[in-house]
Image (cartoon, helix red, strand yellow):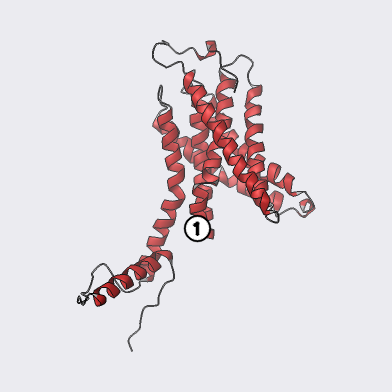
Amino acid sequence: MKVTSPTIATPFAQVVELVDTQVSKTCVRKNVPVRPRPWVQPPNRTSYFLMDIISALALAIAPGLAISLYIYWADKFDPEPRHLLFKSFFLGALATGPAILLENWLIDGNETLEAIPLAVKAFVFIALVEEGCKFAVTYFFAYKHPEFNEPFDGITYAVMVSMGFATLENIFYVFEHGLGVGFLRMFTAIPAHAFFGIIQGYFMGMAKFRHSGNWLLWVGLLLATLLHGAYDFSLLKSDEPILIFGAIASLALGYRFAQQAIVLHQHISPFKEGKGEPKPEDEELPPF
């Protein structure tokens, strides 16, 4: 008995089937003989599965890589060594592990915390945990490195760490919830992580090259956490749709903040033409 391969209801399979159907209809309508097309094979579970995996990975990884490249090009006066940027990205991805474990324990695994208000969960159990993990990686790996030799480097390394974190997190989301969620996060959650990273990195750059400026490290962490918490709280409060505008406002504020931070640190770069040897400690950093 001939066994017919089952139809696989996957996004790639559906696209192939739709295109094949439309081509066949066109040939029939124009009285053109339908010839066998070698690229259209009977539905195959393995091939469709592999194509869906590749499509999902591409969608999940592309936004983080694109933003990383943008920041790399924005560091135009003294670009950082690429191997350090790759390491930062990789360490940021690894930071998702402790962040997920800690979040799950705080939110799901501890029964005594069930009565905690949603705002505390959003601002502390999610935003502070994630921003704290990213902050720790940037501080211990890059902050005291000799290559961290101008204020803009704070932005560069913090964004690389954030994009590594966001990219691995995005892969989890895409494979769990589908390509639609991945497409939405391309314009929301991934840029948001970049904005939070730029805020942290901006203040790291100020802290390193200002006398007695270590307190600015905590200002950066606090502001990134507050903005991240406001974004998450607006999305978690699903019973009040009006709060979705809070998430949009958080993204807009983060974008504006990040845009100014990049311009300001580019402006005071000691490696700009005509400034001679770098002496960032002598630069007067403008207030944000």
In the image, residue 137 above or below residue 211: below
Q: Going 32% across and 86% down the picture, which residue do you hit? A: 2
| Residue 283 in sight in this render | yes
Instruction: Indicate the position of residue 182 as horizontal and vertical percent values.
Output: 49, 53
Q: Going 70% across and 51% down the picture, which residue do you hit? A: 107
Say what secondary structure mark 1 lies in: helix
- The answer to whether 76 appears left or right of 195 in the picture is left
**Which amino acid type is marked by label 1?**
Gly
Q: Residues within 10 Å of mark 1 (few under 14, many from 20)?
A: few
Q: Quadrant location of residue 53? A: bottom left
Instruction: Indicate the position of residue 73 as horizontal and vertical percent values.
Output: 40, 31
Kindly give the residue lying farthest to the front in the view shown.
Answer: 30
Q: Quadrant location of residue 252? A: top right
Q: Which quadrant, please, contains the C terminus?
A: top right
Instruction: Indicate the position of residue 248 as horizontal and vertical percent values.
Output: 60, 44
- Disc 1 target residue: 180
| Along the line of sight, the residue nearer the viewer: 51 or 191 | 191
